[in-house]
Image: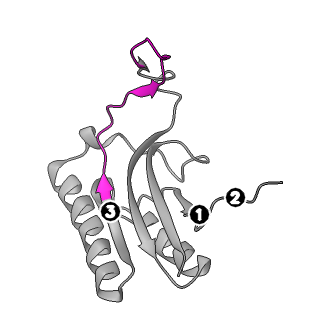
């Protein structure tokens, strides 16, 4: 069965369905409802045997690249935070088809936001490569 990564973003993707403040500006009960929904998704995936992994990520990040044989790694906080993509977390799923991955992504997209209204956020669906790309 193919594996897919469902990526959730703090920022990034196509134009949002509606403007939503960052989670640090939500009421505590809205954050709790949001996180409970995400836990519910993990439970459903486990019950169906489709769950591989799920993780939430903090907004802090560091970009790192090789600095050379005699140099320390080069680090940066990346492009301007207000214009760059920032991954919030992911689900790794093992499903029968791409169609099932899309169905699950749509469900995750309905997660509650402020006031309990669905976020309808974009979920980036990426298939995990099962083998190395062919060499031309």
From the top left corner, tell me how far across and down residue 79 is, in percent: 51, 22
- Taking the view exactly as shown, the residue that stands out farthest to the right is 136
Q: Exactly how many numbered labels are in the figure?
A: 3
From the top left corner, tell me how far across and down residue 89 is, in percent: 37, 52
Q: Nearer the viewer, residue 84 or 113?
A: 84
Q: Nearer the viewer, residue 124 or 107?
A: 124
In magenta stretch: residue 78 = no
Look at 29% across and 81% down and name the residue there.
46
Distance between the alpha carbons at the discs numbered 3 and 1: 18 Å
Q: Main secondary structure of the magenta part?
A: loop
Can you tell which of label 3 and label 2 is closer to the viewer?
2
Mark seen at residue 71: none
Look at the image and tell me in which quarter the C terminus lies.
bottom right
In magenta stretch: residue 60 = yes
- Residue holding disc 1: 129
- Which element is circle 2 on? loop
Q: Earlier in the sequence, mark 3 or mark 2?
A: 3
């Amino acid at each position: 069965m193919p594996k897919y990564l469902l990526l959730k973003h703090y920022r990034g993707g196509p134009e949002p369905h509606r403007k939503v403040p960052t989670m640090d500006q939500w009421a505590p009960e809205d954050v709790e409802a949001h996180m409970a929904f995400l836990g519910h998704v993990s439970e459903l995936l486990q019950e169906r045997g489709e769950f591989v992994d799920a993780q939430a990520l903090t907004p802090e990040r560091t970009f790192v690249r090789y600095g050379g044989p005699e140099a320390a790694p080069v680090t940066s906080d990346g492009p301007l935070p207000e214009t760059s993509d920032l991954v919030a977390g992911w689900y790794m799923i093992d499903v029968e088809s791409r169609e099932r991955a899309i169905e699950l992504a749509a469900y995750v997209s309905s997660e509650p936001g402020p006031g309990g209204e669905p976020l309808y956020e974009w979920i980036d669906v990426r298939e995990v490569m099962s083998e190395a790309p062919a060499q031309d």
